[in-house]
Image (cartoon, grey):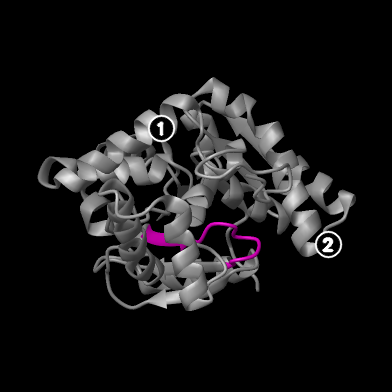
Amino acid sequence: MSTRFKNITVLGTGVLGSQIIFQTAYSGFDVVAYDVADDAIAKLPARWEQLSGYYTHDLGSTPEQLSAAVGRIRATTDLADAVKDADLVIEAVPESIAIKHDTYTKLSQLAPEKTVFASNSSTLLLSDMVSAVNRPEKFVALHFANNIWRQNIAEVMGHEGTDPEVYEELVRFAEAIGMEPIRVLKEQPGYVLNSLLVPLLNSAAGLLIKGVADYKTIDFTWRKATGAPLGPFMIFDIVGMMTPYHLAMARAENDPGQAAWANYLKENFIDQGKLGRATGEGFYKYDADGNIVG
């Protein structure tokens, strides 16, 4: 599927941001990977090596394909440099409305007029962020599932000011990088996927925090009774701890349960560097291929 987008910039190199970068480069696009922190950029070669292992295992990718993908990626901490030639910017920064607004304010000042903005926000609406954008007609949501090389959906969602042609261009781009486009017909927090998934994860977190059952029992119950391949805490490990922590913190003021969950994640995982499968340990421990070993 052809697309007019040639130069792609991804803002944020976390768990999902790095996957979007790698999959886009693997699909033949030149990609600029932007992050605010030098240490995040320094970790990218190890992230590409890890993802290459997953692509080899799951897709049968060749060393030549993977080397070519890495060769199409350029990393920077300079936002102006990152977006100077961008046809499309995919935003995958932390799930905080303040961070999103700050990012889009700066992005609006620096990006060329041609640049389309696409948010990978998991739960925030475009209409929550559009006031910081200087081109609302070129503002679309493009939301990916984790393990995007395998769980290859991309949810495309506009807001009331999105140009229909820009929306269709995002659908074509999603197809061009190997995704199955999911057309979300109206704004919905969580799109389709997370509208189904988040209640499950929140319920699992509540059971754990209340001491109803431990995480392994909760995962076993869900998998055994439904036939699902993964339990909710296995999913938390794939998502990584930072996204659920930011979401819980955003709700903590009005929800004591979310405050307790955020504190639990911080004390037991984030402060100890156990950020999920990408770091080798979250609720479970993982080998180099991402398989649970403990």
The answer to if 144 sits in the magenta stretch is yes
At label 1, counting other C-alpha atoms closer than 10 Å, the crowd grade (few under 14, some 14-19, many 20 or more) is some
Q: Where in the figure is residue 230, as x and y percent of width and height? A: 54, 63
Residue 232 visible (yes or no): no
Q: Is residue 192 positioned above or below 24 on the image?
A: below
Q: Nearer the viewer, residue 163 or 267?
A: 267
Query: Which residue in the structure is indicated by mark 2?
Result: 60
Q: Nearer the viewer, residue 131 or 275?
A: 275
Q: Where in the figure is residue 72, as x and y percent of width and height? A: 73, 44
Q: Quadrant of residue 195?
A: bottom left
Kindly identify which numbered label has been placed on residue 268. Answer: 1
Secondary structure at numbered mark 2: loop
| Residue at point 30%, 57% (across, down) | 202
Q: Quadrant of residue 15?
A: top right
Q: Where in the figure is residue 32, as x and y percent of width and height? A: 60, 40
Q: Amino acid at mark 2?
A: Gly
Q: Nearer the viewer, residue 252 or 62?
A: 252
Q: Amino acid at mark 1?
A: Asn
Magenta span of residues:
139-152
At label 2, counting other C-alpha atoms closer than 10 Å, the crowd grade (few under 14, some 14-19, many 20 or more) is few
| Residue at point 37%, 68% (across, down) | 157
| Residue found at the far left of this picture | 254
